[in-house]
Image: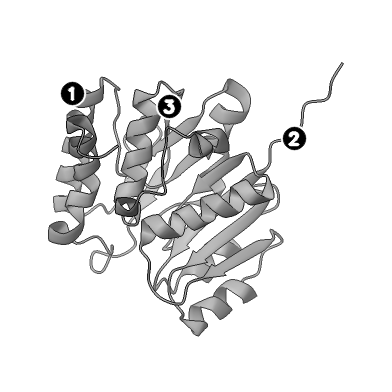
Amino acid sequence: MSIQPRNTTLAIIPVYAEYTIGKVIKQFTDGLVDEICVVLDSPDPDIANMIINAKTTTPIKLIQNRQRSGIGAAIKQGFEYAATKGFNIVVVMAGNGKDTPQEIPVLLNPIIKDGYDYVQGSRYLPGGRPVNTPIVRRIFIRLFPIVWRLSTGFKCTDVTNGFRAYRIELIKDNRVNIQQNWLSGYALEYYIHYKAITLKYNVIEVPVSKIYHSRTNYSKISPLKHWWQILGPLITLRLGIHK
């Protein structure tokens, strides 16, 4: 009887000007993940010190960029680290306290126990918890899944939630080319979402919390500048403009 290798999990946290990152890291208790990879997308020494000195028993890998590259580029750096170090599951989450580390097992269980390849967190499934979601954002978040369902046939409730887990084989698939230049920003996550669905990977949503702690300065996403990066991949991939 052969012994199955143990699943190893890396949490990837892309960070830019997030002074709450130390509090987020402190919430990682033993056994949630094997390692935390924080990608600091700026040369900010104060935030770097917060990350290095954060109190947790979980090992931390800090990757710090000399200049801002974009959230997609930062996540890709985390993926590359995961692949290089042999992690077979990656969790991507926010560094501003919107996501709860204690809910990571909810994302991991479908992969480890049920064979899923990609798990999307949803605040709108039964058991999910949307807290203080701004009204304008709430409208868009609720409408967006309808567009995705009509375009891909995949029934979903919360496409924009960045709390996700992936089997590393999905990220390493040659048909999922995350190294394209247009994927350095928010488009990356929606590109992977689209490819996972259309390539017939096993995809599922699970209920999670999404907590907005403040009604102001709650996000770095600008409606005019960044919403197209979120909606665009679905359109350009369907039309064959991007691959």
Residue at 55 percent across and 52 percent down: it is: 80
Camera-side residue of 210 and 117:
117
Rendered location of residue 207, percent (x, y): 42, 35
Q: Pick whichever of labels 1 and 3 is earlier in the sequence.
A: 1
Q: Secondary structure at mark 1?
A: helix
> Does residue 107 sit above or below 178 in this rendering?
above
Disc 3: which residue: 204
- Local crowd at mark 2 within 10 Å, few (<14), some, or many (≥20)? few
Q: Secondary structure at mark 2?
A: loop
Residue at 56 percent across and 48 percent down: it is: 102
Q: In terms of image quadrants, where is residue 25? A: bottom right
Camera-side residue of 13 and 152:
152
Rendered location of residue 206, percent (x, y): 43, 32
Q: Pick whichever of labels 2 and 1 is earlier in the sequence.
A: 2
Disc 1: which residue: 150
Rendered location of residue 68, percent (x, y): 37, 71
Task: Say whether residue 90 is left or right of residue 181.
Answer: right
Disc 2: which residue: 6
Q: Pick whichever of labels 3 and 2 is earlier in the sequence.
A: 2
Task: Say whether residue 188 is left or right of residue 34.
Answer: left
Quarter of the image with the N terminus in it: top right
